[in-house]
Amino acid sequence: MFSTSQSETAFNLLTEVGLHADELRGSLKLLSDTESRYIRDLKINVSNTLGSENLSRKEAYLIGVAVAVNERNAVLKNAFESLAQDNGATQAEIAEAIACTSLLNANNVLYRFRHFTEKESYESLPAGIKMNIMGNPVLGKEFFELLSLVISALNGCARCVKAHEEGLVKQGTAPQRIWDAVRLGSVLKSLVVLL
């Protein structure tokens, strides 16, 4: 069994993301059971990134929803949806974070293909993917772009990352806000791997 402090740290980590103690299982439980020092690091990373002064709690939790959807973790998605609602997110905003994640998955695959093949024949073809949601997003253009950047970074699409980062810079988004959003996405991905 693990020490009281390790147990508390693991449970506090789950609480931080809206999960319950009974959801301590899988790889996260293994790390707790073996008294891995990484549990403490992960708890600190999650707390620090969710509490970024450059993102509101609502924005952080909406990023959490998007990461959980992207990584196909329904339990974490539901937990972040509740936390987002508790911090003022509407159903329309949550739905749009999910829709943004879906759209970016299509775009990330298509634009990675173009990047990987490096053929002019594909560059000249229209994407042919409807993206009306980007025109007047419920989340606002800046946050929609930020969310798009996080998902593109998670999915490893260099072209999309560059385009969304440039779009944010043109809108006047501070580099630290951009960094904190992507950092949050990366830390939440590290958590999803263990759940």
Image (cartoon, rainbow, N blue to C red):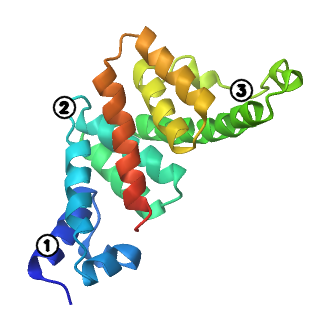
Residue receiving disc 2: 53
Specify the amino acid type for callout 1. Glu
Q: Residue 9, how many percent across, how many down?
A: 16, 68
Mark 2 is on which residue type?
Glu
Please tell me which of labels 1 and 3 falls first in the chain.
Answer: 1
Q: Nearer the viewer, residue 22 or 11?
A: 11
Tell me: residue 58, above or below residue 1: above
The image's mark for residue 8 is: 1
Q: Is residue 145 left or right of residue 48?
A: right
Q: Which residue is mark 3?
A: 130
Taking the spot 65% from the left edge, 25% from the top edge, the residue there is 131
How many numbered markers are drawn?
3
Q: Position of residue 153 (x, y in %)?
A: 51, 38
Q: Residue furthest left?
A: 4
Closer to the camera, 144 or 122? 122
Cα–Cα gap, marks 1 and 3: 47 Å
Given this view, does label 2 or label 3 mark the residue nearer the observer?
A: 2
